[in-house]
Image (cartoon, grey):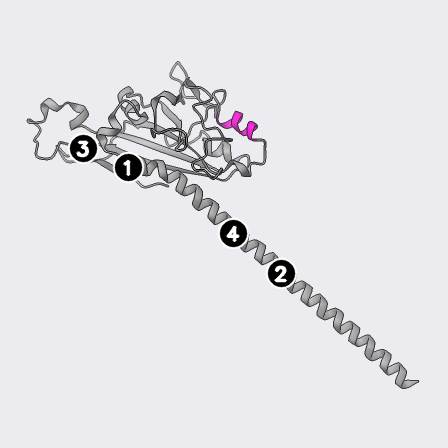
Amino acid sequence: MKITQSLAQQKGMTLITILIILLLVTGIGALAVKYSVMNLRIASNSQVRQLMTQSADLPLYIIRNKSPIELRRLDNVVGLVINNNLPDREYVFCYRPQSQKNFAPINNVAEISPYSTTGTAITSDVMRLISGTNNTFCDLNADFGSARAGVVTQVAVSLITDSAGDTEKGEYLPEGTDSSGAAHLGAKLTGSQRIRVTTTAMLPAYSTASISTVQSECLSTSKPRLNDNTEHPTLRTLKDCISDYGIPVVAQTQEFTLANTLIEEAKPD
């Protein structure tokens, strides 16, 4: 009788021990899965951010590697900005490397302003549309930067009128030319112009709302958004609008001085 009872106790202890081991194994397995998923998410987030940063950098790279003569031509947005000489405007276009040969054609650019027609600063987040159509702004369903339907990049260019700081006299004159000898060249060649370029790269596939809603609220003629709020820090930007819908987004702002050479004034944020 005692032997039978002892065997029953041993079987009970064995069962409890096995159950404890199973619980420990299950817990360790659950933690391993949890950390694996977390590491995967971290890796995915890192890859997504790297992809968007590269997409936002590419238009800046193109501008940085063009000659000032090319940029001043009136067949591109930078030349249009310089020629119009209106510092209260943003000139917006979509970077469409798959569907357009020219980097920044002037036939598809929107002109927006943070000021009303009377010159009063706008306090809402919707800017005044001066020119442009819905086709000017990036189409979140189509205007991808590569054959992989992923990142969409919008670009804005504006003129800066404040001084870049102290410069030496004649710093921007052509090489081998003094101020008297360059008098006939004109201000376009002997002077300099400063521009600010803002790129906003976004991954619309992650949107928590319908793409049509995001398009209407952030990238349309009815609600044009400021791309760069350096001069108007209280205004929300396109990046802010896009991020409201859970879409990963990266914005880069860089300033350039156009002289006889292109001078990088500030690295991307």
Sort mark 1 into few (<14), some (14-19) or many (20+) by Cα contacts within 10 Å: some
Task: State which tag comes first along the sequence, 1 or 2.
Answer: 2
- What is the distance, in whole Å, between disc 3 and disc 2 at their CAs? 61 Å
Q: Which residue is mark 4?
A: 42
Secondary structure of residue under mark 3:
loop
Location of residue 117 by image quarter:
top left
Residue 260: mark: 3
Task: State which tag comes first along the sequence, 1 or 3.
Answer: 1
Q: Which residue is mark 2?
A: 31
Going 12% across and 24% down the picture, which residue do you hit? 185
Q: Report whether 215 appears left or right of 122.
A: right
Task: Quarter of the image for the N terminus: give it.
Answer: bottom right
Q: Which residue is mark 1?
A: 64
Above or below for 88 versus 50: above
Determine contact: label 3, label 4, CB under 8 Å: no
- What is the distance, in whole Å, between disc 1 and disc 2 at their CAs? 48 Å
| Residue segment shown in magenta | 211-219
